[in-house]
Amino acid sequence: MKPVLFSSAYLTQCFPADYAAAHAAFRDASLELLGSGAYREFPFPESGPDRESLVTGVTWQGPVDADKVLVLQSATHGVEGFAGSAIQLDSLHSLTQEVLPSGCAILYVHALNPYGFAWLRRVNELGVDLNRNFIDFDAPLPRNEDYQLLAGSLVPDSLQDWPQATRAIDRFRDQYGQRVLELAVTSGQYQYSEGLFYGGTSPSRSRLHLEEIITDYELEQRRLVAVIDIHTGLGPFGYGEVICDHPPGTLGVQWAKEWYGDCVTEPAMGSSTSVPKTGLIDYLWHRRLEDRVCFVTLEFGTYSVDRMFDALRRDHYMHRHVLEWSSAEMQKVKQAMRGFFYPATADWQEMVLMRGRQCVGQALQGLCHE
């Protein structure tokens, strides 16, 4: 008999069906458990597919003068928000202010990219991947020459071109290898606004909100900050990989390995399922807090990279050519996106919550011992 780790009712409570329900659950839990003074919203002018309002919700849990803060971020990549939102809801319910380590607080940033969460996209309303948007836009835009070779195949002009386009991608992989393909496609590009992993040409609204959050909550004045940014889509099914993009050998890497253990991986060292990338959200935290922050990505695996590429390619194609949300073609693509980045099975949900609790506990313990 399968052991019951979490009740089905609790899993449903932590994993609402869509952005609107997830936002409502996070808002209501914040207000009920912590009071109106702890909760704040950062609105967006766009709306969701059912004309629902879009906001990033922010909640502070713990003493306002805490000198150590854990930041939990969800939905940097919108459609990946189901797991992050669930961990945030679970933490709100399971971590009362009375059990937080002395001098520690938690800042929850719920649905940093609410547009992508609501519309089941990784990107925002302009097609910008927030996790490639944190570059210096006063400098020349980075060039990704290998992406340029693949751009027309990744998002072809018509569905009739799809088989030929896919064969071109396969030939690139056969010639250069899987890692070079993943670097070409996923490391970030700034020339093709309708393409995959597009970093934009200016700071996104979500980036500006996050800059404001760091300032308003005086995070630069805290003694130490830990950030866990929650993602899905890379790695073995249900496994939560702790990825550290601090420069090798720095204090941030040292803290990550002390707090989270030998499971910590480093893209720069080739030990991660993730390849090195341009414009990561990590770099904002590194720049603003310097040696007072330990930033990690908690990445939950789902299915294969090839399946991810196919889902993303079709999503970008549909938003480029077909804008009718209710069409059968669009809904088929959206279900594929949701199913890839959020396998709504009880075993996957349980693994997310268990690993989330473990990493949150490790971060809090690490903070209180530094």
Image (cartoon, helix red, strand yellow):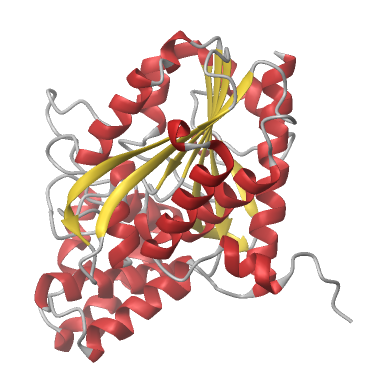
The answer to which image quadrant residue 347 occupies is bottom right
Picture coordinates of residue 149, whole percent (x, y): 19, 58
Q: Does residue 24 show up?
A: yes
**65 to the left or right of 316:** right
Q: Residue at x 44, y 53 (%)?
A: 179
Seen from this angle, which residue lies furthest right?
1
Q: Is residue 279 above or below residue 340?
A: above
Compare residues 265 and 169 and report the one nearer the observer.
265
Picture coordinates of residue 330, whole percent (x, y): 24, 82
**Quarter in which the N terminus is drawn:** bottom right
**Quarter in which the C terminus is drawn:** top right
Compare residues 46 and 336 and report the one nearer the observer.
46
Q: Residue at x 69, y 73 (%)?
A: 8
Q: Residue at x 60, y 44 (%)?
A: 92
Picture coordinates of residue 368, whole percent (x, y): 71, 18
Q: Is residue 120 above or below residue 370?
A: below
Q: Residue at x 58, y 60 (%)?
A: 14
Compare residues 132 and 179 and report the one nearer the observer.
132
Q: Is residue 136 above or below residue 185?
A: above
The answer to which image quadrant residue 130 occupies is top left
Q: How many marks?
A: 0
Q: Is residue 41 above or below residue 300?
A: above
**216 to the left or right of 60:** left
Picture coordinates of residue 74, whole percent (x, y): 45, 47
Q: Does residue 249 show up?
A: no
